[in-house]
Image (cartoon, coloured by chain):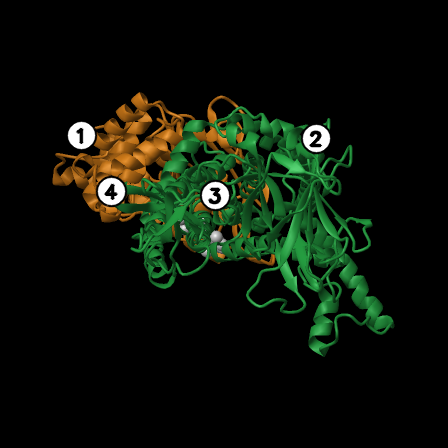
Chain colours: A orange, B green
C-alpha cells in the first residue's frame, strides 16, 4: 500500500446473520476500493445499498465476513488507527444529557488531550460549526441541524487526517447543506481525506472528486466525477452573438472557424441521470458491473 | 456473635489457607489459568467455525496478543473521562431516589422498631445496615447491568469505540464511575444510619425518690441504692456513693453515669450500647461426661452444628486454650492497669434445658483456670448462665486452689509459653451448655464503635464493587435485562454458596440436582436411597457431571454471606483488621478478573451488529 493510499479494501464482504447464524442480508459483496490522500471520496447508492455497512467495516464497528480493510496502514479492527480518524454517524449518537462543551470535552479526553489543548480545540470547533450561542444547552434540546453540527464538531475533535461522513447533509435545510458542503471542501483544502456517503446526488456531485456507486452491495461504478459525467461521442457548442444566418450555417461556420466560438467541449449530463441509469441497468442485469454510457441530456437543462 | 469461619492472619490466608483449603493467591491463579484455558478453547472453537482452523487460530492469537498490548496502553485520562460519564449517567438515571427510599425505610424503622428488647442496639444496627446493604446492592445491580447495553441500544457506543478507546477502559471506567456513585450513596446512608441508631437509642432516666442508705459495718452511711425511672421500656438499678456520684448499672446493653446536680442526682445519657469489643480467641476442646478428650461436645439435635454441648453435673467440660496470655497482661496501652489486676473475658453460653429446673432460676455453671503445663487448677468460680448473651466477666488476679493455697493468675496459671486454659462446666443434671470456639474470648481494650461502623460500611462497599463489576462485565456481552438476571443469579448463588457447594460435593441430603428434582416430584424421603436400576444410574451419571460443573462454578462464586460484617457491629464486636484486608484483596481480585473478562467479551463483540 503506497503512502498515498489511505483506505484500501480487498474483496470486502459483509453478510448479516441472525442469532442462529442464518443469513439475513448480503449487505456488501467483494468490494475493492482505494481512497487516496487528500481527496473527497463519495459512496453513492440508494437506501440499503451498503454504504453505511462499508463505512462501519472500515471503522471496525463490524467485522467483515470475508476480505479485509486496511485503514491508514492498519487493520480496520485496530483501535490505534482511531487516533487519526473522525467519524460522523448517520444519526446523532451522542449523549443527550451533555451540553455541547461537555460533549466535545469528553471526546477530547478520549483522545488523551491535555486540558489546555482540549479547551482551545473545543472553543474553536464550537465557533467553527456555529454553535457558540448554544454551547451550554443540553443536546436533547438541539434541533436536527444543530445536532448534525455538533456531530461534525465531535468528528473533528482530534483534527483527524481521515474523516468518514455518513450522510452528512441528511436532514439539513438548503443553507445548512451549503454550509456543510463548504466545510467539507475547506477540510480538503487543509489536506484531509474525506469519505462521505450519501444518496443525495447533488451533494455528491458538488463536492466529491471521485465516487463509487453501490447498488445492493455491489460496486457498479468507480471513477472521477468529471470523467464519469462526460458524454464522449457528442460535441457541444455554445456560442453567442451569432446572427440567424450564422445559426443556420453552424456546421459550415465551424468548418471555416468563423464566428466567436465560446465553448467546444463534451457536454455533461447530471449525476442524477447517470445514477438512475445505473440503477435501472442493474435491476435489469443483476450481478454485473454497469455498462451505461451517459445518456444525452438536453443541454438547456444545464445551469 | 457467631464466627462460623476462622479468620486467618492475612499472609496465611493469602498464601497457605486453612488446613482444608488453599491459600487465596494460589486459588486465584488456578482460577485464572482455568478460565484462561477455557476462554481460549471456546474462543478458538467459535473462531474456527467461522474462519476455518488456521485462520481461527490466527484470530485467537491476535486477540490475545492485542489484549496484552492494550494493557500497556490504558490511559488514566480516558478511564477517568468514561468514569465521569458514568457518574453523569447515573445522576441522569436519578440514583438519588435510592436515598429517598432509604429515608422512608428509616422512617418505617423509627415507627416499627421498638427498644423494648434486651439488646436494642443489635436490632437497630442490623436493621439499618442490612437495609443499606440491600439497597446499595440493588442500585449497583441496576447501574452496572444496564449501562453498556443502553449505550449499545442508543448506539452512543459507536462514537466511543471509533475513538482510540480500549475496550478495557470502557469496562474500568464504568466500574470506577459507578463505584464512586455508590460510594457517595453509601456514605450518606452510613451517616444517616449512624445518626439514626444513636438518636433512637439515646435516652435518659430520672433517679426514683426513696433511695436506700447503704451502710458499712460500723453503721456509717457510705452510699445509696435505688432505681431509675422506667424510660425506653426499662429501668436500671442505681448505685451512688455518699456524694451521689455513681452509675445506673448495666441493663439493655448500656449504662448511665450519674452525677449530683444541686441536691438530686442526675442521670446522664446512655453509654456503651454500641461497642467494639476486641476479642482474643483461643482453641476449643471438650471433655465428655466420662472426662475423655473430644474434638466436639455432644449434639442436642439442633440442625445447626455450629455449637456442641456438654452435659451438666458430669465431668464434661469445654476447654479453651489461649496463647500469649502474658502478652495481653503487659500490653502497652492505657487499659493495662485494669488488665493487670484481673483478666477480663467474655463468655457466651447457649443453654439447652431438658427440664424446667428450678423455676425462675438460671442454670448455674463453673469456671476454672488451669495451667496446661503444670496442671495447676483453680477453685471453681460459679456463675449463672445467661442464654445467648455476651457475659463479660473477669478472672481475679489472686486465685485459690483446692488445697487452700493462693496463687497468682499470671505467675502460676499461665504456662511458661504463655498459655492459659479456661474450663467451663455445667452444674445441673439434665441441663446442657452449648459452645463454639468463638464463645469464650479474652477481652482486649475496646475499639471505637464509630470506626467499627465504618468497617461494616467498607464491607458493604466491597460487595457493591463486586456487584458492579459483575454487572458491567456481563453486560459487555449480554443485553441489559439478561445481564441483570445473570448478576442476580450470581449474587444469589453467592449468598447460598455453602449450600451450593454442599450440593456439588454431595454432602446435602437428597443427592445432586437431578436426584433432588426427582425426589421433589415423587415426594420421596431424602434419607432413603433411590432404588437401584438403570434410571437411577442415569440420574446419578447426570448429577455427577452437573456436580463437577457446579464445583467449578463455585470456585469463582463470591461468598456474599461471608462478606457481610453487619453481625459483628450488631453484636458489638470489633471487625478484625485481617478480615478487612482480606475482603479488600478479594474485591481487587474480582475487579481485575471481571475487567479482563469484560474486556475480551467486548473486544470480540461486533459493536454495530
Ligand atoms: N444490523 C443489521 N442487521 C441486518 N441487516 C442489516 C443491518 N444493518 C444493515 N442491514 C441491511 O444491510 C443492507 C445495507 O444497509 P446499509 O449499509 O445501512 O445501507 P445504506 O447505508 O446504503 O442505506 C440493507 O439491506 C440493510 O437492511
Ligand atoms: Mg446508511
Q: Quadrant of residue A253?
A: top left
Tell me if residue A212 can be seen. no
Mark 4–mark 3 distance (CA, rounded to whole Å): 39 Å
Mark 2–mark 1 distance (CA, rounded to whole Å): 136 Å
Compare residues B357 and B579 and report the one nearer the observer. Answer: B357
Disc nearer the start of the sequence (2/3) = 2
In the rendered image, residue B113, in percent from the top left (x then y), is placed at 39, 61
In the rendered image, residue B549, in percent from the top left (x then y), is placed at 72, 54
Q: Secondary structure at mark 1?
A: loop
Q: Chain of mark 4?
A: B
> Residue at label 4?
B261
> Residue at label 2?
B412
Front of the two marks 2 and 3: 2
Q: Chain of mark 1?
A: A
> Residue at label 1?
A259
Front of the two marks 1 and 3: 3
* Name of the residue lying farthest toward the bottom: B522
| Left or right position of B114 against A16 | left
Q: Chain of mark 2?
A: B
In the rendered image, residue B585, in percent from the top left (x then y), is placed at 57, 35
Compare residues B55 and A150 and report the one nearer the observer. Answer: A150
> Residue at label 3?
B456
Q: Secondary structure at mark 4?
A: strand
Compare residues A283 and A115 and report the one nearer the observer. Answer: A115
Asked whether mark 2 lies closer than 8 Å to ligand 1, one says no
Q: Chain of mark 3?
A: B
What numbered label is drawn on residue B514?
none
Q: Secondary structure at mark 2?
A: helix
Tell me if residue A26 can be seen. yes
Mark 4–mark 1 distance (CA, rounded to whole Å): 127 Å
Amino acid at each position: 500500500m503506497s503512502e498515498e493510499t489511505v483506505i484500501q479494501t480487498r474483496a470486502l464482504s459483509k453478510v448479516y446473520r441472525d442469532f442462529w447464524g442464518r443469513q439475513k442480508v448480503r449487505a456488501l459483496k467483494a468490494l475493492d476500493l482505494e481512497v487516496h490522500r487528500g481527496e473527497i471520496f463519495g459512496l453513492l447508492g440508494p437506501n440499503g445499498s451498503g454504504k453505511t455497512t462499508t463505512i462501519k467495516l472500515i471503522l471496525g464497528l463490524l467485522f467483515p465476513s470475508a476480505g479485509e480493510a486496511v485503514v491508514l496502514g492498519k487493520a480496520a479492527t485496530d483501535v490505534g488507527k482511531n487516533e487519526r480518524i473522525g467519524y460522523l454517524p448517520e444519526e446523532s449518537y451522542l449523549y443527550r444529557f451533555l451540553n455541547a462543551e461537555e460533549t466535545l470535552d469528553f471526546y477530547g479526553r478520549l483522545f488523551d488531550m491535555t486540558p489546555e489543548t482540549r479547551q482551545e480545540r473545543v472553543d474553536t470547533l464550537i465557533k467553527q460549526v456555529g454553535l457558540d450561542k448554544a454551547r451550554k444547552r443540553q443536546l436533547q434540546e438541539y434541533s436536527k441541524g444543530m445536532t448534525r453540527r455538533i456531530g461534525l464538531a465531535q468528528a473533528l475533535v482530534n483534527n483527524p487526517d481521515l474523516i468518514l461522513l455518513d450522510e452528512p447533509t441528511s436532514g439539513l435545510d438548503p443553507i445548512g447543506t451549503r454550509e456543510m458542503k463548504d466545510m467539507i471542501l475547506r477540510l480538503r483544502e487543509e489536506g484531509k481525506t474525506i469519505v462521505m456517503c450519501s444518496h443525495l446526488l447533488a451533494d455528491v456531485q458538488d463536492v466529491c472528486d471521485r465516487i463509487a456507486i453501490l447498488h445492493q452491495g455491489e460496486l457498479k461504478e468507480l471513477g472521477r466525477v468529471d470523467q464519469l459525467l462526460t458524454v464522449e461521442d457528442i460535441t457541444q457548442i455554445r456560442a453567442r452573438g451569432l446572427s440567424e444566418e450564422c445559426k443556420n450555417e453552424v456546421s459550415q461556420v465551424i468548418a471555416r472557424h468563423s464566428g466567436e466560438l465560446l465553448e467546444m467541449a463534451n457536454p455533461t449530463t447530471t449525476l442524477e441521470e447517470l445514477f438512475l441509469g445505473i440503477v435501472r441497468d442493474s435491476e435489469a442485469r443483476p450481478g454485473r458491473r454497469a455498462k451505461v454510457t451517459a445518456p444525452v441530456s438536453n443541454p438547456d437543462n444545464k445551469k | 456473635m457467631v464466627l462460623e469461619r476462622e479468620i486467618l492472619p492475612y499472609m496465611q490466608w493469602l498464601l497457605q489457607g486453612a488446613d482444608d483449603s488453599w491459600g487465596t493467591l494460589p486459588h486465584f491463579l488456578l482460577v485464572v489459568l482455568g478460565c484462561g484455558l477455557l476462554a481460549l478453547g471456546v474462543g478458538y472453537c467459535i473462531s474456527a467455525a467461522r474462519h476455518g482452523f488456521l485462520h481461527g487460530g490466527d484470530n485467537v492469537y491476535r486477540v490475545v496478543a492485542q489484549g496484552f498490548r492494550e494493557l500497556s496502553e490504558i490511559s488514566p485520562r480516558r478511564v477517568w473521562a468514561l468514569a465521569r460519564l458514568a457518574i453523569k449517567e447515573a445522576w441522569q438515571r436519578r440514583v438519588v431516589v435510592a436515598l429517598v427510599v432509604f429515608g422512608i425505610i428509616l422512617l418505617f424503622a423509627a415507627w416499627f422498631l421498638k427498644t423494648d428488647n434486651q439488646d436494642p442496639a443489635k436490632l437497630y444496627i442490623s436493621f439499618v445496615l442490612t437495609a443499606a446493604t440491600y439497597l446499595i446492592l440493588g442500585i449497583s445491580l441496576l447501574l452496572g447491568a444496564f449501562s453498556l447495553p443502553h449505550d449499545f441500544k442508543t448506539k452512543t457506543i459507536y462514537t466511543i469505540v471509533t475513538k482510540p478507546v480500549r475496550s478495557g477502559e470502557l469496562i474500568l471506567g464504568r466500574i470506577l464511575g459507578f463505584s464512586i456513585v455508590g460510594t457517595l450513596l453509601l456514605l450518606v446512608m452510613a451517616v444517616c444510619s449512624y445518626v439514626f441508631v444513636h438518636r433512637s437509642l439515646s435516652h435518659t432516666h430520672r433517679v426514683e425518690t426513696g433511695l436506700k442508705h447503704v451502710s458499712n459495718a460500723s453503721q456509717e452511711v457510705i452510699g445509696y441504692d435505688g432505681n431509675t425511672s422506667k424510660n425506653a421500656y426499662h429501668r436500671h438499678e442505681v448505685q451512688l456513693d455518699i456524694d451521689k456520684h455513681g452509675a445506673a448499672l448495666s441493663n439493655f446493653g448500656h449504662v448511665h453515669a450519674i452525677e449530683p446536680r444541686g441536691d438530686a442526682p442526675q442521670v446522664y445519657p446512655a453509654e456503651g450500647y454500641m461497642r467494639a469489643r476486641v476479642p482474643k480467641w483461643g482453641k476449643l476442646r471438650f471433655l465428655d461426661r466420662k472426662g475423655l478428650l473430644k474434638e466436639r461436645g455432644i449434639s442436642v439435635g439442633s440442625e445447626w452444628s455450629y455449637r456442641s454441648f456438654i452435659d451438666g453435673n458430669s465431668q464434661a467440660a469445654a476447654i479453651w486454650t489461649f496463647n500469649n496470655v502474658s502478652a495481653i497482661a503487659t500490653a502497652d496501652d492505657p487499659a493495662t492497669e485494669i488488665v493487670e489486676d484481673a483478666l477480663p473475658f467474655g463468655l457466651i453460653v447457649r443453654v439447652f434445658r431438658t427440664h424446667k429446673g428450678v423455676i425462675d432460676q438460671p442454670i448455674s455453671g463453673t469456671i476454672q483456670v488451669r495451667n496446661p503445663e503444670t496442671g495447676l487448677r483453680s477453685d471453681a468460680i460459679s456463675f449463672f448462665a445467661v442464654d445467648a448473651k455476651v457475659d463479660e466477666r473477669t478472672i481475679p488476679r489472686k486465685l485459690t486452689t483446692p488445697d487452700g493455697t493462693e496463687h497468682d493468675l499470671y505467675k502460676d496459671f499461665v504456662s511458661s509459653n504463655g498459655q492459659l486454659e479456661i474450663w467451663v462446666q455445667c452444674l445441673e443434671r439434665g441441663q446442657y451448655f452449648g459452645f463454639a470456639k468463638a464463645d469464650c474470648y479474652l477481652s482486649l481494650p475496646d475499639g471505637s464503635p464509630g470506626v467499627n461502623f465504618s468497617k461494616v460500611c467498607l464491607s458493604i462497599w466491597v460487595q457493591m464493587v463486586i456487584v458492579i463489576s459483575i454487572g458491567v462485565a456481563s453486560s459487555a456481552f449480554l443485553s441489559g435485562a439478561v445481564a441483570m438476571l445473570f448478576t442476580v443469579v450470581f449474587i444469589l448463588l453467592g449468598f447460598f454458596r455453602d449450600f451450593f457447594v454442599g450440593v456439588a460435593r454431595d454432602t446435602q441430603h437428597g443427592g445432586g440436582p437431578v436426584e433432588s428434582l426427582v425426589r421433589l416430584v415423587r415426594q420421596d424421603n431424602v434419607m432413603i436411597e433411590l432404588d437401584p436400576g438403570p434410571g437411577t444410574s442415569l440420574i446419578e451419571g447426570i448429577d455427577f457431571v452437573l456436580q463437577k460443573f457446579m464445583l467449578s462454578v463455585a470456585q469463582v462464586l463470591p461468598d456474599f454471606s461471608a462478606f457481610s460484617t453487619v453481625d459483628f457491629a450488631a453484636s458489638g464486636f470489633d471487625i478484625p483488621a485481617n478480615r478487612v484486608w482480606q475482603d479488600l484483596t478479594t474485591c481487587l481480585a474480582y475487579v481485575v478478573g471481571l475487567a479482563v473478562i469484560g474486556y475480551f467479551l467486548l473486544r470480540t463483540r461486533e459493536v454495530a451488529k
